[in-house]
Amino acid sequence: MSAAGNRGLAFAVAGIALLLAATWYAYRPPAPLGPDAPPSAFSAYRAEAILRDLVGNGVPHPIGSPAGARLRDAIVERLAALGYAPELQSGFVCREGVCGSPVNIIATLRGSAGDKDTVMLAAHYDSVPAGPGASDDGAGVATLLEIARILAARPPPPHPIVLLFTDGEEAGLLGALLFVQQHPLAKQVKAAVNLEARGTSGPSLMFETGTANTWLMRLYGSAVARPFTNSLYYLVYKRLPNDTDFSVFKAAYQGFNFAFIGDVGRYHTPLDSVANASASSIQHQGDNALSALSALANSPTLHPPVGESVFFDGFARTLIAWPTEFALPAALLALALLLAEADFLLHKGAVAAREIMWGGVGMTCMLVLATSLCAGLLALAVAAGKVPPFSGASWISQPAPMQIAAAAIALLAAGGAGAWLSQRAGFWGYWMAASLLGAVLSVASAVAVPGASFVPLLWTLAAGLGALPSTVSLMRHRTAPRWAADFAALFPALVIFASVLPLVRFLYMALGSLAWPVSTLVLGLGAAALLPLLASASRRVQRWVMAAAALFVMSGAVLTLSLPTYSAEWPERINLEYWLDADTGQSHYLVRCDSLRLPPALAAAAHFDPVPRPSFAGDESTAFYAAAPKLALAAPALQPTPAAQLAVESKAADSAAHFDLRLRSLRGAPEALVVFPASAQVADIALVTAAGPVRATVNRLRNGATLLDIVSLPADGVEFSVDAAGRSPLVVQVLDQSYEFPEEGRILQRARPPNATSSQGGDLTVVHRTATLYPAADR
């Protein structure tokens, strides 16, 4: 250990710092184009003007609402002014237990080749009941209208284009399902571009494709000026409790799904306003959408062979992709190269088997210790109430200290491992152990999750190539020069950090606080590649590395435990609800908090129970209860009807029961729900519509109960039939809810802290009752 041994570590620190700066610089959305942008170019300035006109009033516009109808009329008017002939598509559909009547807006542009193969550009125009949805997905709607203007002025492309504005996305992707299942154009569409947002800022990420993404990524790479994508994004996305309209489209079409996810704390809240919409994000989304749509519309074919790819961008300047079939052979080739080098190094005496073993022990302990320490800090922050539990939106207003601590933990553990076993493992023992780990991960991921295989594959290839100068030197001399050994560790380390830093940059917005231990583990892989340099550094440098890392860890932890969890810009999600139990006549206020802790101001406004509990049997969330005045609200009606029995053929077996029912809200609530007990084992739900029966996918709650949710509920209700197990009467729960809070409870709304806001469904008024159902044959 000497000054020469410190040089490689110094180069590594400098290189990682440069990569951090390059990542920050590269992964920013572009500057928005202003009013002087060419008419043929997408301009965020023009799109923002459309956005202000459509949703600048800040009024939420969920499916079936009067505000939604007004917005629909405004979109139709703009399309007509551009020379399109927009049509409205309405109908009744069900998806995963949610049913409703969306109204889609469809405009078409003829293709020059007379080809019926069509491409589609889509965004949804409805919002959640809690917020105006300026970014989700008003920005997408404004982008479609700005692109519609550009397309109308251009020569038509070979393939026709459909512009689809869907309704009911927030309720359950209902408009997308209605189009795919029932519109005549749906069979002609072969590829789709969908626009979404899970925040109000940030770059436009292409995070989801279809099954022919080998072909799609060739188009994307050639068409998009600043590609922001990789195949690992989709793997992460699939594990999130989120869907977009593309979840419906990708079952039928190829295509691209774009979204920006910055400032996710505003997502689905009143803060998703025009004032908070990012012009740069809109510009990037519009550039991507126009480029991708044009590439598809001008493609020689829209019938590509099915084939998946591994892909990633190079600092948003180029796209690198290869078919997934190449992942395993490439991983095996890289492994073979490493094993050959290992055999050579062992034969030359540069490393001993026991040193590789000790290197593996140190590296494994480092990764386990680092991830466990970060997970422990996160658990401590959750227990202290400084980070919300994972059941809700687990984001905080000041995540940077803990993000820095999570990264520093990886370095601290690596420094400790490097110092602890530096004599036993040495430089080449650690190098071999880390490189073989990369090779094993490369092979395993190529088999199990090819989309994630590019990171360990690049690591393994870099390790094998990085060791070549040392190998060549050892062929001629007894020892390799210091620079060659440093390069063997430095090259793979920098390649790993270049691969994972873009992933880590967006991980917190995607996963919330769970991103911290994941980031520690991911960065720990880069730190594993640094272990040879840390082991060969001087004791003094090793101590400085550990001291600096420990300082960052402690500072990050202390700041996270000291700073406010929420702020006005990044508020806690707290929904207020008024519940009336029509069976008992009792009424309650309910408060649902992400933190599961009742704010003092709300606790002082009413006498709440100290422990939260579910609002009804089977409810998967909990709320704080307080007594509330009884209001004269009519209970929802669930009544037997012979009409449904005539319209829907029962699928019930002889031992099962069949129920024909009609559900109404007598007070005109826009949404109603029926919860069937787990004992019913509901097998089939079919709703009666003018176009015929529509079967609802059964949605089971965690306790086995079955939920049927009707949004945009008609005034005269809906009729449906249910097949359930057994012949006994069923006791079901019936609820209707309106997206408003009674005047009598305004004191609670005023007591909601300034660092809190409503979200998703917003503040509600709910009337609940039970109903006993008798099988149709027993009535």
Image (cartoon, rainbow, N blue to C red):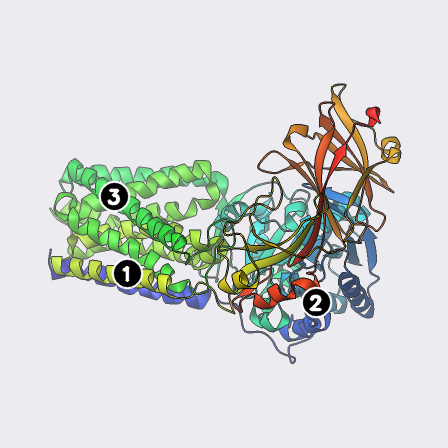
Residue type, label 3: Cys
Going from N to C along the chain, the mark reached first, 2 or 3, is 2
- Disc 1 to disc 3, how far (Cα)? 21 Å
Provide the residue designation for mark 1. Answer: 554
**Neighbours of disc 2 within 10 Å: few (<14), some (14-19), many (20+):** some
- Helix, strand or loop at label 1? It is helix
Q: Quadrant of residue 575?
A: bottom right
Q: Which quadrant, please, contains the C terminus?
A: top right
Q: CA distance from mark 2 to mark 1?
A: 44 Å
Q: CA distance from mark 2 to mark 3?
A: 54 Å
Q: Quadrant of the N terminus?
A: bottom left
Q: Report the residue that reaches farthest toward the top.
A: 654
- Residue linked to disc 3: 365
Q: Pointer 2 and pointer 3: residues touching (CB < 8 Å)? A: no
User: Label 1 is placed on what type of residue?
Assistant: Met
Q: Is residue 169 visible?
A: no
Q: For this rendering, which residue is in front, 648 or 540? A: 648
Q: Is residue 764 above or below residue 356?
A: below
Q: In the picture, residue 589 is in which quadrant?
A: bottom right
Q: Is residue 219 left or right of residue 693?
A: left
- First in sequence, mark 1 or 3: give its number: 3
The three-letter amino acid code for the residue at tag 2 is Val
Quarter occupied by residue 719: top right
Question: Where residue 478 appears, x then y in whole percent?
Answer: 11, 46
User: Where is mark 2, residue-wise?
Assistant: 59
Viewer can see residue 741: yes
Q: Which mark is residue 685?
A: none
Residue 496: % across, % down? 35, 53
Q: Is residue 122 above or below residue 753?
A: above
